[in-house]
Image (cartoon, grey):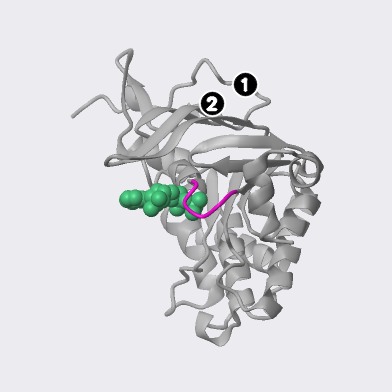
Amino acid sequence: MPEVKSESLQETSTNNEDVIVSYKDVKKSFGDVHVLKGINLDIKPAEKVALIGPSGSGKTTIIRMLMTLEEPSAGEIIVDGKNLWHMEKNGKKVPANEKHLREVRGDIGMVFQHFNLFPHMTILENCMTAPIHVQKEDKESARKRSIEMLEKVGLGDKLENYPSQLSGGQKQRVAMARALVMRPKVMLFDEVTSALDPELVGEVLEVIRDLAEEGEMAMILVTHEMDFALDVADRVIFLDEGVIAEEGTPSEVLEHSDNERLQQFLHRFR
Ligand code: ADP
């Protein structure tokens, strides 16, 4: 058996307290298609970052890599001082194993466009299952925190309902509560409103806005809701053809940039 202790997480030289997520010259190709061409991005612990850009520009790939659902072709991603895809073993840098990936994943919560709730479980059970089975938390405390998080997203009166009994907006709020229960340091939101009927978008954005105002977690939001980005984000990043083509405060990027590609992109929302 390999010595398990030597596989523990290693702090890296970029263990900077002011940075929770760091992409270092990250590239990603699928076959001959170069989707990301060198992303450098540092995100601060409570920072809210909106990621915008045309379809196919690589937004989802950026966040899927953070969730360890895709591996970079080159470069490194550091989360809270831990290298996502590499670990040190016997003084050497080696590819991360499953145990290492599981540990780094614990810092990251994700809400998808489609809610991915378990249909045969109540919404309370949906929230409790990961803390109990992944984090090995005892049932009572998982239950207590799940109720707290469901109350936070305004569903305290629906604990025993099944997903099929809820509206799309309510399901998306359950998905948020389920991610929050894991106490992530970074929350990823990938176009969470784009599968919703227009009249349900507001209630979901409202919950995200409240979370943003609480200010504790870093948040990365892939969104087409420009007014929302303007309102909630500390920083907006415009991704175009696999590179960061523009970044700055929401006002700088959304209202005052003269980047031509960005102007073309924003024009569609006016
Ligand atoms: P966005 O979120 O900005 O729309 P994506 O990150 O989803 O962009 O996709 C960027 C590009 O990468 C697209 O051209 C897409 O077809 C391609 N792509 C994404 N995932 C895969 C995959 N698993 N295999 C092949 N190509 C992929």
Percent position of residue 133, x then y: 41, 57
Q: Which of the two discs, 2 and 1, labels the residue nearer the N terminus?
A: 1
**Residue underneath mark 2:** 81
**Which stretch is magenta?**
53-57
Q: Secondary structure at mark 1?
A: loop
**How many C-alpha atoms fall within 10 Å of the one at disc 2: few (<14), some, or many (≥20)?**
many
Judge left or right: residue 186 versus residue 76: right
Q: Main structural element of the magenta stretch: helix, strand or loop? A: loop
Q: Which mark is residue 248?
A: none
Check the picture and name the quadrant holding the C terminus. Answer: bottom right
Q: Quadrant of the N terminus?
A: top left
Q: Residue at x 69, y 53 (%)?
A: 266
* SS type, badge 2: loop
Q: Amino acid at mark 2?
A: Gly
Answer with left or right where residue 98 lies relative to residue 217. Answer: left
Label drawn at residue 16: 1
Position of residue 217 measured from the top left corner of the image (x, y, whole percent): 68, 44
How far apart marks 2 and 1 lie (CA) works out to 7 Å
Disc 1 residue crowd, few under 14, some 14–19, many 20+, Cα 10 Å: few
Residue found at x 58% / y 35%:
244
Query: Looking at this rendering, what residue extends furthest in the left direction?
Result: 1
Front-lying residue, 163 or 224: 224
